[in-house]
Image (cartoon, rainbow, N blue to C red):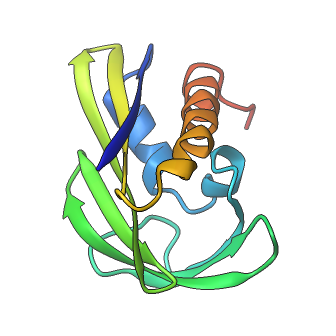
């Protein structure tokens, strides 16, 4: 398992919401163009589809769940990234992506996602 992590100057609850809100995924996930999900906020066992940056639609399923802390999924039937938020204080947290051992090439994508999450958490869009 490979790990990419970043400390973010925002409350863990704010970052957690970004991670579980399917409407946010295309904003911070470089490999996600769109999401088709029966619920906006993910939870254990949720199934849906993601459209990749290449335009291909793949089924997903949430396979791991720790409320307010971590989630993992399968995409296209393959174990994909895990997502974790650890509070470091009231206004600071660490976000980690757990990357399967077979996918070290995905590290730069996760680094870019962490930068985008940090930007959205510390400078939310108006509205």
Numbered disc total? 0
Left or right of 109 on screen, residue 5: left
Q: Is 91 drawn above or below residue 32 in the view shown? A: above
On the image, which quarter does residue 4 sit in? top left
Percent coordinates x, y for residue 20 in the rendering? 44, 56
Residue at 22 percent across and 63 percent down: it is: 65
Quarter holding the C terminus?
top right
Residue at 75 percent across and 81 percent down: it is: 56
User: Which residue, as the protein is rendered here, is positioned at the far right?
Assistant: 55
Left or right of 44 on screen, residue 49: right
On the image, which quarter does residue 44 sit in? bottom left
Percent coordinates x, y for residue 98 in the rendering? 34, 48
Left or right of 1 on screen, residue 77: right
Residue at 41 percent across and 67 percent down: it is: 42
Viewer-proximal residue, 106 or 33?
Answer: 106
Q: Is 101 drawn above or below residue 57 in the view shown? A: above
On the image, which quarter does residue 33 sit in? bottom right
Viewer-proximal residue, 100 or 72?
Answer: 100
Percent coordinates x, y for residue 30 in the rendering? 70, 50
Q: Is 38 drawn above or below residue 82 in the view shown? A: below
Percent coordinates x, y for residue 94 in the rendering? 33, 25
Residue at 26 percent across and 50 percent down: it is: 70
């Amino acid at each position: 398992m490979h790990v990419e992590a970043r400390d973010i100057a925002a409350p863990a609850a704010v970052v957690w919401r970004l991670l579980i809100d399917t409407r946010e995924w295309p904003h911070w996930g470089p490999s996600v163009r769109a999401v088709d999900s029966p619920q906006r906020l993910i939870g254990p066992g949720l199934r849906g589809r993601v459209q990749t940056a290449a335009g291909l639609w793949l089924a997903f399923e949430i396979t791991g769940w720790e409320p307010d802390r971590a989630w993992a999924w399968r995409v296209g039937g393959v174990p994909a990234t895990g997502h974790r938020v650890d509070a470091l204080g009231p206004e600071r947290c660490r976000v980690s992506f757990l990357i399967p051992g077979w996918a070290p090439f995905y590290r730069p994508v996760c680094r870019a996602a962490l930068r985008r999450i940090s930007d959205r958490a510390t400078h939310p869009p108006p509205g």
